[in-house]
Amino acid sequence: MKSVPVVALEPVGDDVQLAYDYFEERLMGGGDAFLSRYFAMADRIALNPETFSIKFDDYRRALVPRSNIAVYYFIEPNRAVIAVVIDARRNPRLIRRLVRQRRGAV
């Protein structure tokens, strides 16, 4: 598949802020380091959105390196859409429910 733009659903901004705050609390500059890895992951998704495997339904999961943060996204014909950025250690049922709710709200 060719490269596509990556967009995020509106609530993803809050997800990223929570993760930023989490890493910043643990280490000064940790939030910025997380953001750098997150945006690098988004770039990888853009280059080839099919790189990451399907986790459930048509949602794919990319893990942000050196973190427990997962990026759940789906592919549309002309773009990849990030639905949730969440701690991958959370209950899988909660994650699936959240991802599906967000997509339904689009």
Image (cartoon, helix red, strand yellow):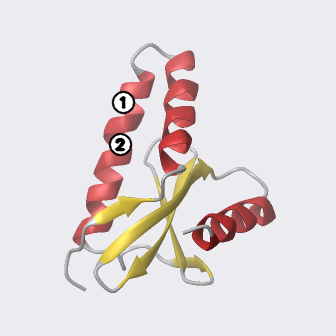
Which residue matches tag 1? 33
Residue 8 shown left or right of residue 44 in the figure: right
Return the mark for residue 37.
2
Q: Quadrant of the N terminus?
A: bottom left
Q: Quadrant of residue 51?
A: bottom left
Q: What residue is rendered at 64% in x and 53% in y?
A: 88
Residue shown at the point (26%, 58%) measured from the top left: 43
Mark 1: amino acid: Ala
* 99 vs 22: above or below: below
As drawn, which residue projects farthest toward the front? Answer: 106
Q: Secondary structure at mark 1?
A: helix
The part of the image, by quadrant, that contains residue 95 is bottom right
Relative to 84, residue 77 above or below: below
Say which residue appears at 47% left-offset and 58% top-offset: 9
Whether residue 79 is visible: yes
- Residue depicted at 50% across the width and 34% down the height: 17
Residues at circles 1 and 2 in contact by the CB criterion of under 8 Å:
yes
Q: Which mark is residue 61?
A: none
Q: Is residue 54 above or below residue 45?
A: below
Residue 67 seen in the figure: no
**Residue toward you, 41 or 83:** 83
All told, the count of numbered labels is 2
**Crowd band around label 1 with a 10 angstrom C-alpha radius: few (<14), some (14–19), many (20+):** some
Q: Amino acid at mark 2?
A: Arg
